[in-house]
Amino acid sequence: MTENQAFPEHVFDALGVEPSVQSEPIGGAIRVVEKRPADGPITVMTSGASRLPTDSGERVELAVEVLEGQQGAARIALEIVCDDMASNRRVPPVGTPWRNGEPFLSGTRISAIMVTPSRWGPSFDEVRSVDGELLGHVRTLRLLTDAEAAFASANGWETLVEEAGSVDALLDVTRDDAVAGGGAAGNAPVFLSKLHAEHPPRWVTFTGTDLQSVTGLESDEYMDDAANHEVWSVETFVARFPWVAGFVREARPGQTALFTDASGTYELEDD
């Protein structure tokens, strides 16, 4: 068996059941197959994503677990990640949720994708040669709400599963949030005034897609001048003002936090 054969054969053999192939490939070349193991949920997989060139050289196929009737949701997630792999030559990172500003599944709260280990362990997750050489992986994509993604970012996948009750509690894409939470993604933008170079934030607002921060010393005339504004990332903002981290991690869209000191204590001023 050659290296190029290892990936399609791994997908074919995975979970001990033959795949059912969907008629329409992704991007004209990546097949989508469905597995129905007797002891687990429906699993929708790619066959051909491993052929996409990546800057790291890593080769991966993708998998999504879904309930009966929700295979279309799995396909959308696979399309999103395959498009990112093809466009940016990168594989999705394990344990770091990709969070969208709005749900990408119509009629649901699902707005995030996170790569985690599968329920099956290395026999499913690792693609190996006949000699045992590790050639690549099958990456399992989890479809999460924004609150779940924020919780997982702060606490990890295993803690999210524990809080939700089981991994199966995170399958139904029509569910409400399995955990309480919120917060801004680490790469989300923070719009703030240049007065932050000398003064700490006083009011910080989470819009749902970005943060907006003012020191309380800005006049209307100052705010009207675009030259007085900057854009940071959330990661940079929290590194500079670490006491805002609690609010950033837990914030819900529309909330504004009032900070009066650097203790991390804040008051909410909901819109």
Image: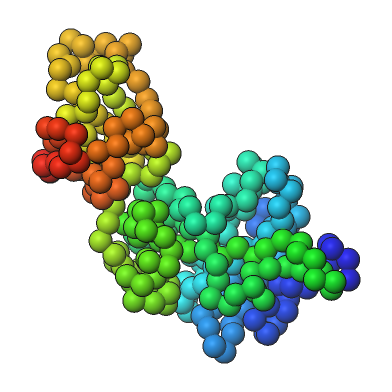
* Residue 32 can be seen, yes or no: no
Outermost residue to the right: 1
Query: The C terminus is located in which quarter?
Result: top left
Question: Up-down: is 101 above or below 108?
Answer: above
Name the foreground residue: 24 vs 19. 19
Q: Residue at x 29, y 37 (%)?
A: 242
Quarter assignment of residue 26: bottom right
Quarter assignment of residue 152: bottom left
Where's residue 163, x and y in %? 32, 70
Where's residue 222, x and y in %? 21, 11
Q: Residue at x 56, y 52 (%)?
A: 93
Question: Up-down: is 21 above or below 99?
Answer: below
In the picture, measured across the screen, residue 238 lies left or right of residue 121, that is: left
Where's residue 120, x and y in %? 58, 77
Query: The N terminus is located in which quarter?
Result: bottom right
In the picture, measured across the screen, residue 105 lies left or right of residue 200, that is: right
